[in-house]
Amino acid sequence: MRDRINAAMKDSIKARDGRRTTTLRLVNAAIKDREIALRGEGKDGIGDEDILAILQKMVKQREESAIIYGQNGRPELEAQEREEIEIIKEFLPKPLSEAEVDAAIKSAIAETGAEGLRDMGKVVSVLKAKYPGQIDFGQASKQVKAQLGA
């Protein structure tokens, strides 16, 4: 994943795409910061799942900023945040559709043998392991709860 980001940054520099280059530099800086923090904890290296979490966090931050800019009459800054979101999303896995999420939840319930709400954690952990970055787990938790009979 890191190689894809670096290759995209090189391409954007060659194409003189300022917004894309700046955004990808921010992504690389966030990855480097996380890597340094992990080294401080005695862990070596950063994996794709860590990079995925960083990218998701960056998208969420930009979505919140875009909303604030929109509410405060700053359309140029809102547009900038939305452009950055689209650039970052290129490196995230494609999200599952509602039907696919529903099928994944049913499969995870069957796999874990979940029968009630106390088994909800098992189901969600299976979903997180199989579909990292592809499911909004806030929404998925509500659906799991509904399917388990809450």
Image: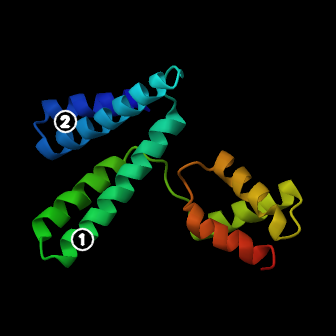
- Three-letter amino acid code at disc 1? Ile
Q: Quadrant of residue 51?
A: top left
In terms of depth relative to the viewer, which is nearer, 63 or 92?
A: 63
Is 46 displayed left or right of 69 in the figure? right
Q: Is residue 78 visible?
A: yes
- Three-letter amino acid code at disc 2? Ser
Location of mark 1 (residue): 68
Residue 23 percent across, percent down from the top left: 23, 43
Tag 2: Cα neighbours inside 10 Å, few (<14), some, or many (≥20)? some
Who's the residue at 13% across and 41% down the image?
17
Who's the residue at 41% across and 33% down the image?
34
In terms of depth relative to the viewer, which is nearer, 131 or 70?
A: 70
Q: Cα distance, mark 2 to mark 1?
A: 28 Å
Who's the residue at 25% across and 66% down the image?
66
Discs 2/1, front:
1
Tell me: residue 77, above or below residue 10.
below
Q: What secondary structure is found at the residue carrying circle 2?
A: helix
Location of mark 2 (residue): 12
Tell me: residue 1, above or below residue 40.
below
Q: Quadrant of residue 138?
A: bottom right
Who's the residue at 32% across and 65% down the image?
64
Q: Is residue 89 visible?
A: no
Q: What secondary structure is found at the residue carrying circle 1?
A: helix
Question: Pointers 2 and 1 in contact (CB under 8 A)?
Answer: no
Is 121 displayed left or right of 128 in the figure? right
Tag 1: Cα neighbours inside 10 Å, few (<14), some, or many (≥20)? some
Residue 14 percent across, percent down from the top left: 14, 30
Q: Earlier in the sequence, mark 2 or mark 1?
A: 2
